[in-house]
């Protein structure tokens, strides 16, 4: 089992920046089977949306709505993924959840962190 702990959410004005962190912990066996780490978001009345994902080799994928503004990165030595969010918009307001895809195991999810962008 992989445990994920998120941090870095908060309140920011439109145009501002925030950086989310997601630290993974668990047994050496489970951590070594983490294939991708990513961020999803869920806003009231909306469906869960994939924001960004990064593989263990550094391949990234982004939702069209955040391309050019958000950057996902990963420090494999620290088992931590980051989401740098720039030029934030009010529509980015949501609860952001960290996700880890683990080979031969169910996905792991963080507890969620609130990001609120005021216009």
Image (tube, rainbow, N blue to C red):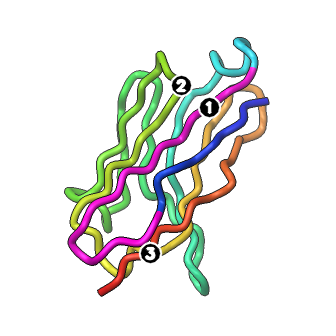
Residue 91 place in picture, x, y as percent: 38, 80
Against 15, residue 36 (above or below) is above
- Mark 3 vs mark 2, foreground winner is 3
- Which mark is drawn over residue 116? 3
Residue shown at 48% from the left, 60% from the top = 9
Residue beneath label 1, please?
24
Q: CA distance from mark 3 to mark 2?
A: 26 Å
The one of 78 and 37 positioned closer to us in this rendering:
78
Residue beneath label 2, please?
79
The one of 117 and 42 positioned closer to us in this rendering:
117
Q: Earlier in the sequence, mark 1 or mark 2?
A: 1
Residue shown at 47% from the left, 20% from the top = 76
Start-end of magenta stretch: 10-26
Residue 45 belongs to magenta span: no
Residue 117 place in picture, x, y as percent: 37, 77
Q: Do the CB atoms of the residues marked 1 and 2 lie less than 8 Å apart?
A: yes
Q: Residue furthest top?
A: 28
């Amino acid at each position: 089992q992989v445990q994920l702990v998120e941090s870095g959410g908060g309140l920011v004005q439109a145009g501002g920046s925030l950086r989310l962190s997601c630290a993974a912990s668990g047994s050496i066996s489970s951590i070594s089977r983490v294939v991708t780490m990513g961020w999803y978001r869920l806003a009231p009345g909306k469906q869960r949306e994939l924001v960004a994902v990064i593989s263990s080799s550094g391949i990234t994928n982004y939702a069209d709505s955040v391309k050019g503004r958000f950057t996902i990165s990963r420090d494999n030595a620290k088992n931590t993924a980051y989401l740098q969010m720039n030029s934030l918009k009010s529509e980015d307001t949501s609860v952001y959840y960290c996700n880890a895809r683990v080979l031969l195991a169910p996905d792991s999810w963080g507890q969620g962190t609130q990001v609120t962008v005021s216009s």
